[in-house]
Image (cartoon, coloured by chain):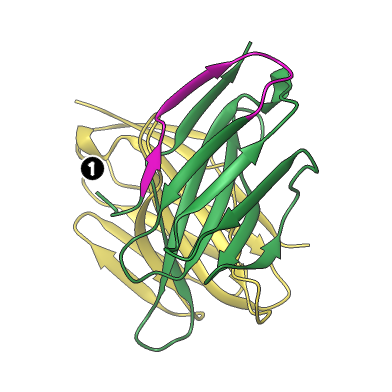
Chain colours: A yellow, B green
Amino acid sequence: EDQVTQSPEALRLQEGESSSLNCSYTVSGLRGLFWYRQDPGKGPEFLFTLYSAGEEKEKERLKATLTKKESFLHITAPKPEDSATYLCAVQPTNFGNEKLTFGTGTRLTIIP
Amino acid sequence: DSGVTQTPKHLITATGQRVTLRCSPRSGDLSVYWYQQSLDQGLQFLIQYYNGEERAKGNILERFSAQQFPDLHSELNLSSLELGDSALYFCASSVRDRGGVTDTQYFGPGTRLTVL
């Protein structure tokens, strides 16, 4: 069964203090690893898709990287508006099964 | 705004009742997914429809059912409701990326269900 574990559960940073969020996964075959951002009471907002080990993607202050067992979401010089829960999810390679298995998320708080 | 719409935003009902949640996917998306998010369990996949046909099933209770209509909108029906069914219910729709490798799922704003 596919599993996703995210750490830490919660992270408080000062504005401008860079850090990384971790996503460890086990899946029989990885079709894609996804990062989403979720604000309280709202739907997850798509950030990145990573397909294979060694791949990196960047968007503003966020950079996502992928290895064979984990992914990192690096946040550089964060601002208060980056405060949210960041969710990681995996999609298996099985044809006809596009479901996402999510981790429980990292709740990030950026203090001004 | 993801382009996925869900109604209603909030629903308050009593135990034993039945409700219907509605989802309209992004224009052109053929796949619709339903997920449940509760405080203690995170986002859990319920069911997927592709162009009107059921494609994959997760841990969806027998009291729950879904369908996708010819215009591609989908409904999730929850019956004999229990207190533990209180949660956020999200719909997502997917578009295949240019390489055709995987489907990026875009989520709607959700329906918050409260069962009293």
Q: Quarter of the image containing the N terminus of chain A? A: bottom right
Query: Which of the 4 image quadrants contains residue B73?
Result: bottom left
In the rendered picture of this protein, how many numbered marks are placed on residues? 1
Secondary structure beneath disc 1? loop
B39 relative position to A49: left or right: right
Report the quarter where the C terminus of chain A lies.
top left
Residue A7, above or below B86: below
Q: Is residue B11 magenta?
A: yes
> Residue at 59% across / 70% down in the picture?
A98
In the displayed structure, would residue A30 be above or below residue A79?
Answer: below
* Residue shown at the point (24%, 49%) measured from the top left: B1
Residue B96 placement (x, y as % from top left) = 41, 78
Q: Residue at x 51, y 67 (%)?
A: A33
Residue corresponding to mark 1: A78
Q: Which region shows up in magenta? A: B5-18
Q: Chain of mark 1?
A: A
Q: Choose between B79 and A30: the one closer to the eye.
A: B79
Residue at the (34%, 86%) spot, across then down: B98
Q: Position of residue B75 (x, y in %)?
A: 54, 47
Are there few (<14), some (14-19), or many (20+) residues within 10 Å of tag 1?
Answer: many
Q: Is A60 left, or right, of A72 in this rendering?
A: left
- Type of the residue with mark 1: Pro
